[in-house]
Amino acid sequence: MTKPIIAIVGRPNVGKSTLFNRLVEERLAIVSDTAGTTRDRLYGDAEFAGREFIVVDTGGLELDAHTDLPGTPAAMLAGVRAQAQAAIDEADAIVFVVDVEQGPAPDDFEIAKILRQTAKPVYLVVNKADNDARRQDAVEFFQLGLGDPFPISALHGVGTGDLLDAITARLPEEIAAEPHAIPHLAIVGRPNVGKSSLLNAILGEERALVSDIPGTTRDAIDTEIVWDSQPLVLIDTAGLRKRGHIDQGIEKYSSLRVFRAIQRADVALLVIDAADGVMAQDQHVASYVLDEGKGVVIVVNKWDLIEKDERTMETYTQRIRSALDFIAYAPVVFVSAKTRQRVRQVIEKALIARASWQMRVPTGELNELVREATTRHNPAVKGKRSLKFLYATQADITPPTFVFFVNDKKMVHFTYQRYLENQLRERWGFEGAPLKMVFRNRRSTER
């Protein structure tokens, strides 16, 4: 299911992360009085009045006075425009946060100028309006030309209900994700790891371009190719970076574009720079793939630049497994997009991952495996009660979803769940595909 995306934008230190935490009802974003504080997670699932959506906490839109720009106001304003436009392109609705204590700032006017040009819903949120005087001061922001402001206190939750009422009334409906007849592979990763080079290497090796298909974003192009008689669609996210000095600001919005690409894909090709190893942003992107339940192949690019001996690849693989242990099922391919070394293996592994992602296990064979696994390793015992597995079935694919009926699902420890998952993978492989494990009490209809 593809959920609508709401992007929270605004200058640094106006309370975007606090509002994000309020909307997702969980403290996912690190909140600090220091402008530009790094956040562990930039997105979260939210629900209000029966509507589900995704909230994205973006970096602050600002005129960066510390860059080596030529120093002209026009050049610095271009950075703000580009950052705002990146958020507009990817989101279904924009929440523009301003600070009532600081009043309308020059950056607010520049951001508002861009937001006024979009047909997408824009909600002007005046934060820190936690008393009557400040709520009255919110009228100053009418001059931004974005309609009636919503005075709120993200910290205390004041006014957020009215804001959510307005947002959910205009959100697009969720779209059921229909299985693709043709495999869709998304090339994802942080900036400058070689995503464009990998795309070019794939296209250059096969040279069987069929067509360019307009994507769901303003400048994304899905490329359809034929690979060994197999039609494929490559979803390229490498177009995020622009020429010039505005790159740094736009990269703050890479999560939005990656999000869209992963949602539309069957398998993500997670590209990592061999020289840098696994960085925090690589882990963020990998978590997006896992949360969306997509297949994944880890592509270690620029392998030609690494000095090697007979153990280099093994050692490097262990480091990747340690840093990305939550997708330990993902195959790792070491490539050089520049020389096209092992590029063929990337596609081969991606197609295996997609087949695993779509795999269905016969019910009889599944229950036989469960009986064997529980005999080898007895389930938990609590007092006089012991955990019993009564029946198992595969409820869905994309990703493979297994439902285990037990006498008491509260007794299923995560270590035993991991044991069962390992048994499934040992028997059927599922290389590159996540597995969803659901435990139900026999008479419960709750998933």
Image (cartoon, rainbow, N blue to C red):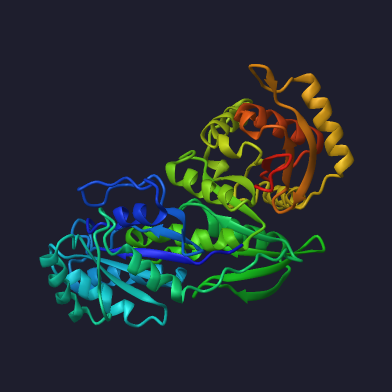
Instruction: Judge from the rendering whether residue 342 lies leftward or rightward of residue 76; answer left or right.
Output: right
Snapshot quadrant of residue 115: bottom left
Q: Foreground residue, 355 or 435?
A: 435
User: Residue lying furthest right in this view?
Assistant: 364
User: Relative to 2, is 414 above or below?
Assistant: above
Residue 193, image x, y percentages = 49, 50
User: Relative to 158, is 321 above or below?
Assistant: above
Q: Foreground residue, 407 or 417?
A: 407
Residue 398, image x, y percentages = 71, 54
Name which residue lies at 32% across and 60% down: 249
Residue 245 seen: no
Snapshot quadrant of residue 68: bottom left
Snapshot quadrant of residue 71: bottom left
Name which residue lies at 42% across and 78% down: 120
Name which residue lies at 65% across and 66% down: 176
Residue 12, image x, y percentages = 24, 58
Q: Foreground residue, 285 or 102?
A: 102
Q: Foreground residue, 399 or 353?
A: 399
Residue 98, image x, y percentages = 22, 66
Instruction: Judge from the rendering whether residue 281 lies leftward or rightward of residue 117; answer left or right.
Output: right
What is the count of numbered marks?
Answer: 0
Quadrant of the drawing holding the N terminus:
bottom right
Residue 172 seen: yes
User: Relative to 31, is 201 above or below?
Assistant: below
User: Residue lying furthest top in this view?
Assistant: 383
